[in-house]
Image (cartoon, helix red, strand yellow):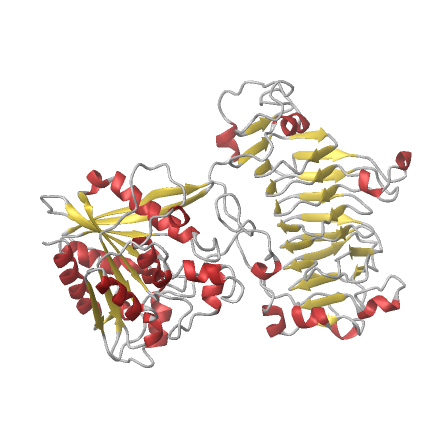
Amino acid sequence: MKYFMKSAFFYLVFLLLIISNSFSQVTSGEIKPLDSEKLKGKIEHDIVVAQDGSGHFKTIGEALDAIRVYLPKPITVYIKPGIYKEKLVILGPVTNVTFEGESPENTIITFDDYAAKDNMGTFETYTLKVLGNSLTFKNLTIENTAGNVGQAVALHAEGDRLVFENCRFLGNQDTMFASGENSRQLYRNCYIEGTTDFIFGSATAVFENCVIHSKADSYITAASTPEWVEYGYVFKDCKLTSAPEVTKVYLGRPWRDFAITVFINTEMGAHIVPEGWHNWGREKAEQTVFYAEYGSFGAGANSKERVVWSHQLTENQAKKFHVYEVFAGKTKDSDFYGNRWFGFEKDGSFNLQDAWKKDVKNFPQITPVEIQSSESVTESRGHIYKKLGGRELKLDVFSPTQAESLRPVIVMVHGGGWKSGDKELQIPMAIALAERGYVTAVVEYRLSPEAQYPAGIHDVKEAIRWLKVHANEFGIDSSQMAISGSSAGGQIAALVGMTNTEEYEGTSELDASSEVQAIVDMDGVLAFHHPESAEGQVASEWLGGTYEQKPEVWDAASPLYLQNPIYKPILFIQSQYPRFHAGRDELIDKLNAKGIYSEVHTFPDTPHPFWLYNPWFEPTIEKMIQFFDRVFDK
């Protein structure tokens, strides 16, 4: 089957970005009431809603009326505790807003319409209808209290890039209409209850760590996935529960013939029937739907008794469907700040100890270089150089304790395949260089699980600008600045050092340039698409697609192929592997043609991350010092 070959769902793990200002912090202080009629469509700042009049508005509807459409930057609507009986529509032009309650237990949005009431039909019964994009809802209850009177929707969601976190959705039949053929929705740590088809629609939606509670013998899902959509509903790490008297519940039935619903690592209660799935009386639909499970457990996880036209995924099949794949699309997967809208989990796969355990098998003489503080070096950690909503990017500065004059500074960028690694990996080298008289700064930047290219380039350039603005604090001579990077960090260092156009600079409010005077590239590729390059999956994850899909992005991220490069002196320090200097020789030819100095030093018989180990750590430092002394004419 098409969907079986192209679409299975694998273990999805991620962490949403945390909003740094707490509810209590932002809602404290004096707040003056606002007039929603006079300010209709004009407000661009955070809003507080409180029924007792202590906020900007008493109702959520008034706040919605006041929000400017297509906001220039994100805002938050803080909703104080209360039962808000309101029938709400968030229109399409309302974007980049977070609606945050105090808790789902005390911040409740409620209404009681139902389909048979005045013949309004199912799709007008909503309590909350969400048509806007890039919206987040936190700590809220959204309920329809009509009772057992037929279809009565609590949430009607059709926007794209919608996130619901720690919310409750209460109702009976058709509680949640998660729909929209181009809609992507994430439900994390939520509680959803209902009777019949209480999660239904055409959206691509992921339900992570949610409780799904059945109140009657019936069906949980009724997906209406269009034939051309690859993903439908994915439930991961969820728990299926029921009322005590409920004993016969199906996982789903197809509202349309190409419905897709998958449960991964889900605990299923005894109320789930052994056969699992229902064809809604349409045998032909059995050939076109894609119903699957992986890792189900509990009394209702009867994999051997499931209907023959459903699927039990293998581990390998499940792994093919990462959250990045589920939510990928031709439209953007980034939010206002360039971060993935559905959150991320930090990838810790590249770290010193694991790298050493791998490499020591082939190089038994190596020892990892650990962080050791030095009396001759002053450490200044945790400086926030960039804020992206609630996300803070930091850098650490190491400077000679006894410096009597302004010193050159080296900005250091870690490697890890653009998806892993940490600035801590650069600290031993940063301390060693500081002991020899240089100011050094190790930089945190966004990796591919969090934000795709060119976000990381923008981050490193902002770090350079921040250091220049704060040069006097650290004894920095901002006219003598170099950037050094290893592996993926080497590619970033070269690209940052050789560019100054808007595409690479990003936006900044700092009055400083990102220009550097020298570059050190340790085993970083200079051309992604090149006969010597072996870049594939990890590069694709960072660049947003394969070379065949996005050749212009692959070339734009390759220092060798820059259209308007700014050539700087470069030191190339290489391992024994040619793939890590793809494009180097051609770039050196270009440097030579412009009379720009460069050096190449290759350590034979070395692992790729040689700079992390003895016996190559000190020789690497010496090569860098010699290069910097020459470039900075010390």
Q: Is residue 598 left or right of residue 540?
A: left
Residue in the image at 53% along x and 30% along y: 46
Which quadrant of the rendered structure holds the C terminus?
bottom left
Quadrant of residue 367 within the rendered picture = bottom left
Which quadrant of the rendered structure holds the N terminus?
bottom right
Where is residue 293 drawn, in percent x and y? 70, 67
Residue 229, visible in the rendered structure: yes
Residue 371, visible in the rendered structure: no
Residue in the image at 79% along x and 52% along y: 243
Relative depth, front residue between 323 and 355: 323
Where is residue 170 drawn, in percent x and y? 74, 43
- With respect to residue 100, does 280 lie above or below? below
Where is residue 254 drawn, in percent x and y? 81, 60
User: Outermost residue toward the front?
Assistant: 593
- With respect to residue 578, does 60 lie above or below? above
Quadrant of residue 102 within the rendered picture = top right
Q: Is residue 425 left or right of residue 226?
A: left
Where is residue 591 drawn, in percent x and y? 24, 62
